Image (cartoon, helix red, strand yellow):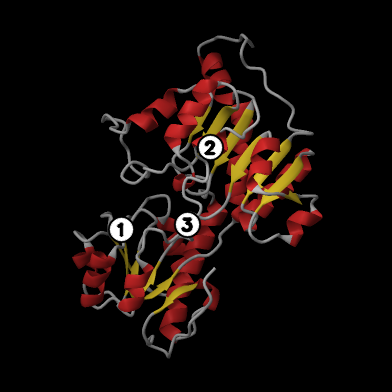
Amino acid sequence: MRIAFFSEHAFQTPFLIEANREHGHELVFFKEQLSRRTAQLAAGFVAVCPFVTDKLDAETLQILADGGTKLIALRSAGFNNLDLAAAERLGLCVMRVPAYAPTAIAEHAVALMLALNRRINHAYNRVREGNFSLDHLVGFNMEGRTVGIVGTGKIGESLARIMHGFGCHILGYDIYQNPACIALGMKYVDLPTLLSESDIVSLHCPLTPETKHLINEESLKLMKPGSMLINTARGGLVNAEAVIEALKRKDGLAYVGMDVYEREEGLFFSDHSSSIIQDDVFELLTTMRNVIVTGHQAFLTREALAEIAHTTLGNVADYERGTPNPKNVLSVGVKGPGGPLHQSPRE
């Protein structure tokens, strides 16, 4: 099949080309972000492959459908950038990559924890300047600390395994209790208890109307003095303005590591080094010495990129044969070239 890839990035393209060796699809890459302004570029493509930053609102999906698109093959797990109801109404099949190398994201969360704790960024800059003073670089032992994991799916489970190896006490909060996490010694508690008892809180839950600003002015007041917040999940889980005020108070939250940001759209995945960033909240966060922000790179390992490419192109091949993996289907869409598609439960 001919597949239109939008928001092409150099870090991902080689993995897509390599994974396509077993399928033989025709891959056409567009640097442009997919939106209502660029959707006409996909005219004539049965399959369109958007990136997580692309905007698939109802108008964009209508243009795609009018141009002959039948399949939206997301190369991501999240789909909050897509109007799923509109896709279903238009008869578009939507498939995604529900999970890929969860260890990659868990390990990045740990990297943020350690960098914040041991002041790695400050130590690195000092040594480059010939300053070998150890003042203000004192950290704490991870062993024996309590780590609260919000969301205990595959990524949360991976983090629990790592924290167990560090000798940490592990608390968990989730609608569903993961037996693998319980086997590691995780104790499930309600969110207020987790926030008030954890030295480190790490977020690994999806962004839904119920979880938006899960971390807010009130919940931040529950956190222990000297505690740390890590977010490698979705930016909208955290109210950034409330985090800044909590850090200023110095009576609870003391460290923040963020790989995602609520208003990252139009900011992350692009080079803005020669321009002035207009988001004052983001700029203030990056000036705070106890905050580390990375640009949505937690997933960025060779293993994860290979898995994303393999599953994405496999989804297109499955659609073409009419035998999609039910776990990867978000919208049943219309009949595929090889046969009917079947509705699958949403995860």
Give the numbered dot on residue 15.
Answer: none
Crowdedness of circle 1 by 10 Å Cα count: few (<14), some, many (20+)? many
- Residue 18 placement (x, y as % from top left): 46, 63
- Residue 23: tell me if it is visible: no
Image coordinates for residue 284, horizontal then vertical, percent: 39, 26
The residue identified by callout 3 is: 208
Task: Estimate the x, y position of residue 146 in percent, counting from the top left.
Answer: 73, 37
Q: Single out the mark in the foreground, 2 or 1.
A: 2
For the C terminus, the image quarter is bottom right
Q: Closer to the N terminus: mark 2 or mark 3?
A: 3
Which amino acid type is marked by label 1?
Lys
Residue type indicated by callout 3: Thr
Find residue 207 and report its horizontal and vertical position in percent: 48, 54
Q: Disc 2 or 1, which lies upstream in sequence? A: 1
Q: Which residue is drawn at 42% across and 33% down?
A: 241
Residue drawn where x is 52% and y is 25% of the image: 247
Q: How far apart are marks 1 and 3 (CA)?
A: 17 Å
Q: Earlier in the sequence, mark 1 or mark 3?
A: 1
Q: In this view, does 126 lie to the left or right of 161?
A: left
For disc 2, the marked residue is 218
318 relative position to 221: left or right: left
User: For mark 1, what is the residue?
Assistant: 55
Asked where in the image residue 69 lies, by quadrant, the reply is: bottom left
Identity of the residue drawn at 37% across and 58% down? 81
Do residues under tags 2 and 1 come within 8 Å of each other at their CB atoms? no
